[in-house]
Structure formats: structure tokens, C-alpha cells
Image: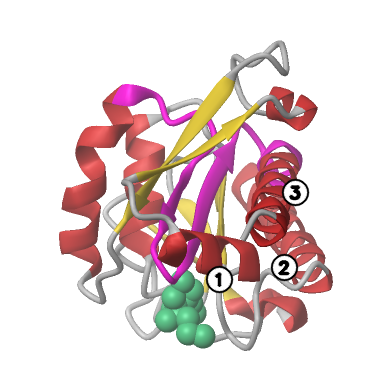
Amino acid sequence: MDQTVTDFARAVQDILFAGQRMDQRGWVPATAGNISRKLADGRMAITRSGCHKGFLQAADVITVDMQGKPHSPENRPSAETLLHCQIYRHFPHVGAVLHGHSVASTVLSMEEETAVLTLADYEVLKVFEGQTTHETSVQVPLFENDQDIARLAEVVEPFFGTGMPAGYIIRGHGVYVWGKDMPTALARLEGLEFLLACALERRKLHA
Ligand SMILES: CSC[C@@H](O)[C@@H](O)C(=O)COP(=O)(O)O
Ligand SMILES: [Zn+2]
């Protein structure tokens, strides 16, 4: 079978699986979230806008170029496609990008007054790139929400130079994480969501 067709078929499977997993964990309520996977030919497969990520069908996954332009003009990709393009542009080794709207990321990012969430001393920090011990801290940048995604991307842009090992959070909205492939991106999301849930519990205990 044609390589491009096989690669796209695998990407569709990856995206459907990720959507179901994120839905099971309560990270993509209603039609929230978006999911993409880089294709071997340099384009990306991404979720169509407005689909429930737990009930994705193969037809809900479409292809766009790295500027976010759909292969077929009648296909409307995720409203947040430009944020995926930006991550692939900055990190050539990245093969999958995930965006979810968990309770913990939404609440903590609205409550935190500084521009970062600091996660420190947790064993699970080791799920992030370059982390080998719990005796460390990881800073997750927080950005103001904006319905103008091109403008939001401009605000996020300078932070890519800082590495951002765990991804970033848009306030009152949700997280963006990525990985070299879909299993790695899912493991990072699971790790980050676990840490955010711990941080939220600790804030409640100490309130
Ligand atoms: C349920 S509203 C969520 C949307 O506004 C958006 O933030 C989102 O994550 C999904 O948008 P989509 O265009 O389906 O990729
Ligand atoms: Zn969103």
C-alpha cells in the first residue's frame, strides 16, 4: 500500500485512541480539545473543528499543511490549528500534540496570580523531557486566553526559547503538551494532569 496512505491511516488510529483516552479521563468535556499527529510527508493530521473527541470517527481527522491550510478547502480544521503548527515548527522532533480542558488546568490557571505554575518535588516530574529526579521543579507558563489564536500564538512564541519541558496552559482554558510520538504525548499529558490534580488538592488542603 502507498506509504502516505498507510501513515495517514496510522495517524487516524493514533488520534482516535488519544481522543477516547482523554475523554475517559474527563479532559475533553463537550467538544473541547484538539489532537494532531505529524505525517511523514511534512503535513499534519488534526481533528476537525467542533467534534466530540471521545466519539471521533475516521472522517473527523483531516490533513493540513504546516501553515494550517486544509488539504481540502471544505474541511474546517480545529480552531486552534495554528498552536499545533507553532509547536511542530519549534520542535522538529515532535510527532504529536494534545490539547485538553481538564478541571485542574482550568481552575489552577485562574487562581494562580503569577505567570507560571511551579511543580516541585514530585516523582512524576520525571515524565518530562530532561528530568531525572524528583528534586527539581518544572515551570509551566500561563498565558491569558484569547479567541484570536494568531495573537495568542504571538504571545506564546518567545517561550519556546526557554524549552518548556511540560507544555503550557492557557488561563481558564486548558493545556498544550507534545511528544515525539502519540504514546509519549499521552504520557506527558497524563503526567501533567496528575501533577495539576495534586497541586489543586494541596491548595484545597491549605486553604
Ligand atoms: C467546548 S469549547 C472549546 C473550543 O472553544 C476550543 O477551545 C477547543 O478546544 C476545541 O476547538 P476545536 O475547534 O474543536 O478544536
Ligand atoms: Zn481549547
Q: Amino acid at mark 2?
A: Gly
| Tag 1: amino acid | Gly
Q: Which residue is mark 1?
A: 33
Q: The C terminus appears in which quarter of the rendering?
A: bottom right
> What residue is disc 2 on?
19
Q: Answer yes or no: do the residues labelled 1 and 2 have beta carbons within 8 Å? A: yes
Q: What residue is shown at x 31% (from left), y 46% (from top)?
A: 115
Can you tell which quarter of the image residue 205 is in?
Answer: bottom right
Q: Position of residue 180 (x, y in %)?
A: 61, 31
Of the two numbered discs 3 and 2 on the same chain, state the one appearing first in sequence.
Answer: 2
Q: Quadrant of residue 172?
A: bottom left
Question: Residue 9 in magenta?
Answer: no
Asked whether disc 3 touches disc 1, contact meaning CB atoms under 8 Å apart, the reply is no
Q: x, y percentage for residue 7? A: 66, 47
Is residue 39 visible to the viewer in this orientation of the structure? no
Q: Which residues are magenta?
A: 162-186
Q: Residues within 10 Å of mark 3 (few under 14, many from 20)?
A: some
Query: Type of residue at label 3?
Result: Phe
Residue 90: image location, x then y, percent: 33, 32
Rendered view: 99 above or below 70: above
Helix, strand or loop status at disc 1? loop
Which sits earlier in the primary sequence, circle 3 or circle 1?
1
The answer to which of 108 and 94 lies nearer the viewer is 108
Distance CA(mark 3)–CA(mark 1): 18 Å
- Closest to the observer: 94 or 38? 94
16 is higher (above) or lower (below) than 164 = below
Mark 1: C-beta under 8 Å from nearest atom of ligand 1: yes
Question: Which residue is tagged 3?
Answer: 194
What separation in Å lies between label 1 and label 2 (alpha carbons)?
Answer: 9 Å
Q: Is mark 2 within 8 Å of ligand 1?
A: no
x 69%, y 44%: residue: 195
Q: Residues within 10 Å of mark 2 (few under 14, many from 20)?
A: many
